[in-house]
Image: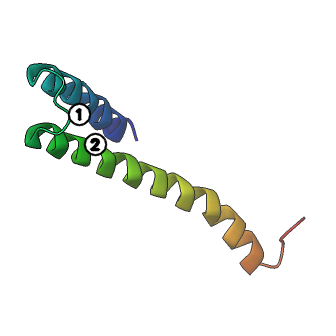
């Protein structure tokens, strides 16, 4: 997870620098591209967390130990 966190932080910093280099133009194609990359990484992390959170509950239900 640290590597993904590092990628997110690196892209976040790159996004800030790119926005600054285009004088705050959030609609510049380069800004949008980096923003979309960052969004994709964040969504992937959230999906993994959600899947991991659901996995123990699903395993418990399947084994008949739900609610114990």
Marks 1,2: beta carbons within 8 A: yes
- Taking the spot 31% from the left edge, 29% from the top edge, the residue there is 9
Q: Residue 3's quadrant in the figure?
A: top left
Residue 49, x across and y down, in percent: 52, 52
Secondary element at image label 2: helix
Residue 5, x across and y down, in percent: 36, 35
Q: Quadrant of the N terminus?
A: top left
- Taking the spot 88% from the left edge, 66% from the top edge, the residue there is 67
Q: Residue 25's quadrant in the figure?
A: top left
Q: Foreground: 21 or 55?
A: 21
Residue 10, x across and y down, in percent: 24, 29
Query: Where residue 58 is drawn, which disc sits there?
Result: none
Residue furthest to the right in view is 68
Classify 10 Å Cα crowding around label 2: few (below 14), some (14-19), many (20 and above): many
Label 1 vs 2, first from the N-terminus: 1
3D distance between C-alphas at marks 1 and 2: 6 Å
Above or below, comparing residue 60 to residue 46 in the picture: below
Above or below, comparing residue 1 to residue 24 in the picture: below
Q: Residue 13's quadrant in the figure?
A: top left
Above or below, comparing residue 61 to residue 52 in the picture: below
Above or below, comparing residue 21 to residue 41 in the picture: above
Residue, disc 2: 38
What is the tally of numbered marks visible in this picture? 2
Secondary element at image label 1: helix
Q: Quadrant of the C terminus?
A: bottom right
Residue, disc 1: 11
Q: Is residue 65 left or right of residue 56?
A: right
Q: Is residue 26 left or right of residue 44?
A: left
Q: Foreground: 66 or 32?
A: 32
Q: Is residue 1 left or right of residue 55?
A: left
């Amino acid at each position: 997870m640290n590597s993904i966190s590092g990628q997110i932080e690196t892209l976040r910093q790159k996004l800030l620098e790119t926005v600054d280099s285009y004088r705050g133009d959030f609609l510049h194609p380069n800004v949008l591209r980096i923003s979309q990359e960052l969004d994709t990484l964040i969504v992937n992390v959230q999906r993994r967390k959600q899947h991991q959170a659901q996995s123990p509950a699903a395993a418990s239900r399947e084994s008949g130990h739900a609610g114990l």
